[in-house]
Image (tube, rainbow, N blue to C red):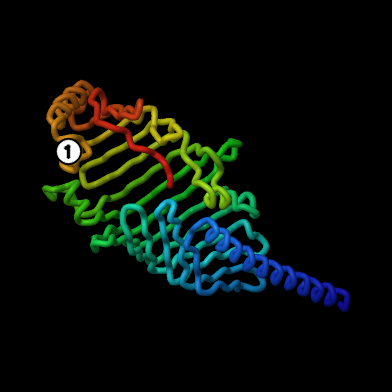
Amino acid sequence: MRTLLSLIILGAIAWSGYWFVGSSGLQTGVAQWFDDRRGEGWLAEYNTHEVQGFPNRFDSHFNNIYLADPGTGWAWTAPEFQINALSYNPGHLIAVWPDQQKLATPIDKYDITSEDMRASIVAENVANLTLNRATITATELDVTDSKGHTAALSSLVLAAERLPESEEAVYRLGLQIDDFKPSLPWKKLIDPSGALPDSLDAINADLTVAFDELWSMEAINTARPQPRNIHIRLVEARWGKLLLQLAGEVSVDSIGYPTGEVTVKARNWKEILELAIASGAVPEGIGGSLKDGLSLLSTLSGNPETLDIPLTFEYGKVKFGPVPLGPAPVLKLR
């Protein structure tokens, strides 16, 4: 009994030493990371950083954190932020965002509120946090721009997992958004007649993306990994009686131009085309001829209400069936 008690005491002392050494190393590593970002020209500050959770957790609590990268025009600030990890499994992190935060992008500034926003991240390499898989969830998420216009959704799930059979930086991505309510200006732009409901029923996506390098803390600190191949298993949006589905594959060059073909399947496609013309996504000058051509194609396919036609990307241009739409989008992460 005395021997057992001695072993328990020794084990407790050893584990306590491990926790305090680990927490000290974590605080030092966080301070060094912020120093490195400032050395690269970032604005990187926080009021306080504490490590709690003894004996089984390393819980990092930040107060008044602020990060800004002038090189990309992105900035983020929050009154608090948490990154939690089990002390016996430091490669599994849980990030917890506050109910209120602010995000600035090259396009606009946004106030973000949510009831519950968090991420679960599993890293292959604890030293540089090479991503193995991650899941981000949010409920009752509202995003308000600088003009006071708000877009909202009831729930969001975004998941990423590195494919185990590939030695390259290939990740499978999944997205599910329920009850998405676009901001009023965007709704009026897309649906000027007000024929559609205020909210999209759902947006779902399942795709595989090959990047030029693995997602890790080191890669994010230097340059964001860029997509080189995108395989869309299915992207689906349901908005009232409208249904839009995409599937296909494109490669992406070093500039960001895609090359390949994505099949577009649309139910009640005439209404979708009218929305695209009203929003400016399809030039008004070709809207009429495009509608006539697509009507013929849909009739030949056997169902005039359903459209099944390729969206082709080539030489920096995009075509919808045989009709040129203009320059292709640049797919580049900043």
Q: Say if 3 sits above or below 317 in the image.
A: below
Which quarter of the image is occupied by the N terminus?
A: bottom right
Q: Which residue lies furthest to the right in this view?
A: 3
Circle 1 residues within 10 Å: few <14, some 14–19, many ≥20:
some
Secondary structure at badge 1 equals helix
Rendering coords of residue 89 (x, y %): 65, 59
Give me the residue at 50% from left, 39% from top.
211
Instruction: Determine the residue positioned at 46% across, 44% down.
Output: 173
- Where's residue 307, x and y in %? 24, 30
Q: Which residue matches tag 1? A: 277
171 displayed left or right of 151: right
Identified at 39% across, 28% down, the residue is 259
Q: Nearer the viewer, residue 268 or 184?
A: 184
Pick the front one: 332 or 294: 332
In this picture, is 66 found above or below 229? below
Q: Quadrant of residue 3?
A: bottom right
Question: How many discs appear?
Answer: 1
234 left or right of 48 in image: left
The answer to whether 101 appears left or right of 269 in the picture is right
